[in-house]
Image: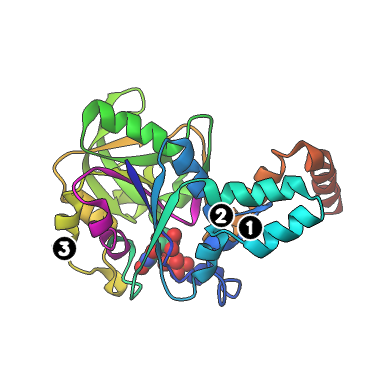
Amino acid sequence: MKAVIPAAGLGTRFLPATKAQPKEMLPVYNKPTIQYVVEEAVNSGIDDILIITGKGKRTIEDHFDKSFELEYNLKQKGKLDYLKQVQDITNMADIYYVRQKKQKGLGDAVRCAKKHIGDEAFAVLLGDTFTYSDVPCTKQLMDVHEKYGGSVIAIEELPEYKIERYGIVDGTHIEDNVYGVNNLVEKPKLADAPSNLGITGRYVLTPDIFDKLDSTDAGVGGEIQLTDAINAQDEVYACTFEGKIYDIGNTLEWLKSSIDMALTHDDVKEEILLYLKEKINEN
Ligand code: UTP
């Protein structure tokens, strides 16, 4: 299976940080967000990845490219740990790029992958959203797709205050963490929400999505919504993902994700916890 990572968005919610740099390159502790995303695809068994880029996103390509000068420098200075880290980034997967010419929404970004994907099911991982779990989120979706066929979307149970900001699933429970999707409702009022199950930014899509995208009209702000096209598909499942998911396009969530990832590093964990305790006492 191939993967598509849409990373062409404007990142308006994270201005001014995203004025001259892609939000997908913002570091979460010590790695750019999009590296976590690529690692998730690779750890799910995917080695062919198409990143949808756009204007001002060239550092994404540079990050995954070989850097002869940097490698030479690190080798000369004997910094072999760093050298390995830098080389691993380049060797992780075959990464391809296509540019979305105008930011016409996530649906339009996915449509840019049509030629590269062809006629097979493929994974979509939003470039500004990363996950943390034992079994990679995308692998969990691939397993559901293998069992049931159809498109599969990752969902999470949302607290009430978040429901009006998400696409919400109207579904029928099938087994354990799997639902059959009857309908997807984009950002409903809390009172009208069919459930508390929100769409999170990971998908396995069957290739008929491209025809559905072609016949999807632009919605709010002239954007083509991926949710509308998935809604038009005949067979869609939703899978409650086991793990944590972070949308770093939101500044507060980005900050929390950085703390959480830093706490997974034993060399800094104690110091961070002490610092946080100090802050709590001060406030
Ligand atoms: P978002 O809607 O969160 O990204 O899209 P955005 O448009 O950059 O956000 P704001 O509202 O302006 O802050 C989720 C993912 O889809 C990509 C984004 O790069 C992000 O990774 N995307 C979005 C595209 O590739 N193209 C688009 O036209 C829109």
Label located before the other in sequence (3 or 1): 1
Disc 2 to disc 1, C-alpha distance? 6 Å
Q: Which disc number belongs to residue 27?
A: 1
Asked if ligand 1 lies within 8 A of label 1, the reply is no
- The crowd level at tag 2 (other Cα within 10 Å; few <14, some 14-19, many 20+) is many
Say few, some or many: other residues with alpha carbon within 10 Å of mark 3 (under 14 / 14 to 19 / 20 or more). few
Instruction: Determine whether, in the image, residue 28 is placed left or right of residue 46.
Output: right
Mark yes or no: residue 240 visible: no
The image quadrant that residue 62 belongs to is bottom right
Amino acid under label 1?
Pro
Residue 65, by quadrant, is bottom right
Circle nearer the N terminus (2, 3): 2
Compared with 147, 208 (above or below) is below
Q: Secondary structure at mark 1?
A: strand
Kindly check if marks 2 and 1 are in contact, taking CB atoms under 8 A apart as contact: yes
Residue 11 in sight from this viewpoint: yes
Q: Which residue is mark 2?
A: 33
Indicate whether residue 129 is drawn in magenta: yes
Tell me the magenta residue range. Answer: 108-130
Q: Secondary structure at mark 3?
A: helix
Front position in the image: 280 or 127: 127
Q: Is residue 87 left or right of residue 45?
A: right
The amino acid sitting under disc 2 is: Thr
The quarter of the image holding the C terminus is bottom right
Q: Residue 214 has which mark?
A: 3
The tally of labels here is 3
Q: Residue at x 67, y 46 (%)?
A: 84
